[in-house]
Image: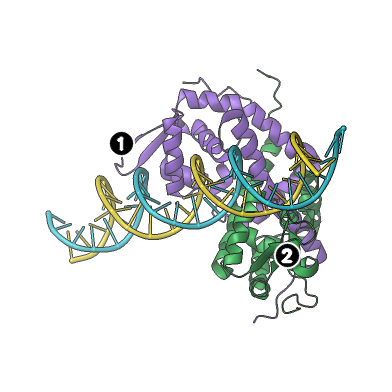
Chain colours: A purple, B green, C yellow, D cyan
Amino acid sequence: MSADTRWLSTEESAAWVRLVALAELLPGALDAQLQRDAGLTHFEYVALMSLAEAPERTMRMTELASRTNATLPRLSHVARRLEERGLIRRFPCPTDRRATNATITEAGLQLIADAAPGHVETVRASVLDALTPEQLEQLYAIAGAVLARLDPDERLAATSCQFSEGPTLARAG
Amino acid sequence: MSADTRWLSTEESAAWVRLVALAELLPGALDAQLQRDAGLTHFEYVALMSLAEAPERTMRMTELASRTNATLPRLSHVARRLEERGLIRRFPCPTDRRATNATITEAGLQLIADAAPGHVETVRASVLDALTPEQLEQLYAIAGAVLARLDPDERLAATSCQFSEGPTLARAG
DNA sequence: GTGATTCGGTTGTCGCGTCAACCAATGCGG
DNA sequence: CCGCATTGGTTGACGCGACAACCGAATCAC
């Protein structure tokens, strides 16, 4: 009976409620747009993006799972579906025959290249354009502070969610 | 072919990646703690909390669904499970015989009363205690600006996630 | 009143994620 | 070498949420 619970102050409660609402709504909004326009979940989009930006467009299943905050079984299921759709290919790793490498195919690159503009547009419309430059900086700091608690190993730090505007990644065989 | 896509700047991309990571990890962290300590999902916790704070500890299914950002089928499934566990009760609304009212039981009140301290502790440990008072205020404003886009009707504005420290809600029959 | 429409809710089906079980390959101790 | 634990990954069963179909009750047109 720890009666010494530090309940939330009014300000804490208000901010918390909003953060929870945000965390509740954002994934659904991202999934809905990507599903509608590209037939992809946000998770699939991030996974394909990660592969697209990896050296040789190839990554070990375990590393991909870690970078996308997925369990290995989950990634395995998703990879099977993506492979059935011809968006990725899997093959045993030559140096460690336990491991599996995943590579994004040309069709996969094409799909995310087509999907990226709409996705970026959604990100702007639902979040970024609602914030001032100062708030953008504040958000970066705040999310960083929280992630230090939730993701101490910074496994998700390297996820990428957009194409840069540099030399296009698609068709760069 | 909209080649006029406004790609993300470095600052935007960095903040966005962190926000996505946060939205990805937070629900899992909340679910894990509540599941472990009370056998509840975060959604079930919020639903029970909403009932506990409603007048007569009773609410219409439709209103509860709206406040918790749930579809009606989802809420119906969850309500059936909670009822089977004896945490809520459902009965037809006397004034509109189409409608169903849900009431939290004594057992339900007891459960969330027991679960609340641990949950608040988790909220502090994973988020609130990582932020300065200024950042808390900034978070409130930022999340408010984004929610204006994601939840224009402010349906989630009234969700409550904690017990106040006022007269305890449990056992107040 | 009576028929058509809408509202409030429940039920069934399907897809995805989790968990546990399993298998092959590797590494390690002796 | 030979056990044995560990690593990397897949598979199957189960639970939850989304979607569609459905039903009774209320409402509206006239």
Give the quarter of the figure containing the N terminus of chain B. top right
Q: Element at badge 1? A: loop
Query: Where does label 2 land, which residue?
Result: B51
**Residue at the (76%, 49%) spot, across then down:** B143
Rendered location of residue B30, percent (x, y): 61, 60
Q: Amino acid at mark 1?
A: Pro
In this rendering, position of residue B149 left or right of residue D7: right
Rendered location of residue D26, percent (x, y): 80, 50
**Residue at the (58%, 55%) spot, across then down:** B28
Query: Where does label 1 land, which residue?
Result: A94
Look at the picture and state if C15 lies above or below B54.
above
Q: Nearer the viewer, residue B99 or A159?
A: B99
The CA span between labels 1 and 2 is: 57 Å
Q: Report which quarter residue B58 is drawn in.
A: bottom right
On what subunit does the disc labeled 1 rest?
A: A
Look at the picture and state if A12 lies above or below A87.
below
Q: Report which quarter residue B44 is drawn in.
A: bottom right
Rendered location of residue B122, percent (x, y): 64, 66
